[in-house]
Image (cartoon, helix red, strand yellow):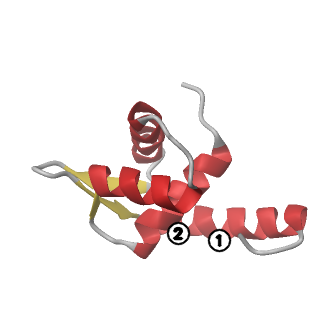
Amino acid sequence: MEIDIVVLYKLLNIVYENPGISMTELFKRYRQKEGVKVNYTKVRKHIEYAEIKGLVNVRKGKPASIEITKKGVDFLFLMNRVLSGVLGEQI
């Protein structure tokens, strides 16, 4: 499973800002925010990876809702520090 750490960071940031967001809504907001065409399977793959690693909880149902965990918030904080150091600005 190939994971793009920056895509994961951006997806988790959207989940953080929108607790309980559905996968469809996450996909739509990511697409709007990034202004790029993104494959739904790619978004789902990153969220599945985040769930395996304990960064998010996915509550099954129609629609499934996604919530970030404490570990996910810690990951966001760490990545924000790393990316701001690399890019010289907050993302």
In the visual, does 20 lie left or right of 61? right
Label placed on residue 26: none
Q: Nearer the viewer, residue 41 or 48?
A: 41
Residue extending furthest toward the left: 62
Question: Can you identify the residue that label 1 sits on?
Answer: 77
What residue do we see at 53% from left, 69% from top?
73
Which amino acid lies under the numbered mark 2 shown in the image of this protein?
Val
> Where's residue 54, x and y in %?
44, 51
Residue 6 location (% of width, % of height): 66, 50
Q: Is residue 26 visible?
A: yes
Instruction: Determine the residue positioned at 10% across, 50% down.
Output: 62
- Residue 67 occupies quadrant: bottom left
Q: Secondary structure at mark 2?
A: helix
Which residue shows up at 56% across the image and 54% down it? Answer: 35
Mark 2–mark 1 distance (CA, rounded to whole Å):
6 Å
Instruction: Confirm or deny contact between disc 2 and disc 1 (CB under 8 A).
Output: yes
Most distant residue in the top direction? 1
Residues 79 and 62: in front is 62
Element at label 1: helix
Judging by the rendered image, the residue that carries numbered circle 2 is 73
* Along the line of sight, the residue nearer the viewer: 58 or 86: 86
Give the quadrant of residue 81.
bottom right
Relative horizontal placement of residue 5, taking residue 71 as reference (left or right): right
Figure quadrant of the N terminus: top right
Q: Amino acid at mark 1?
A: Phe
- Is 23 located above or below residue 78 in the figure? above
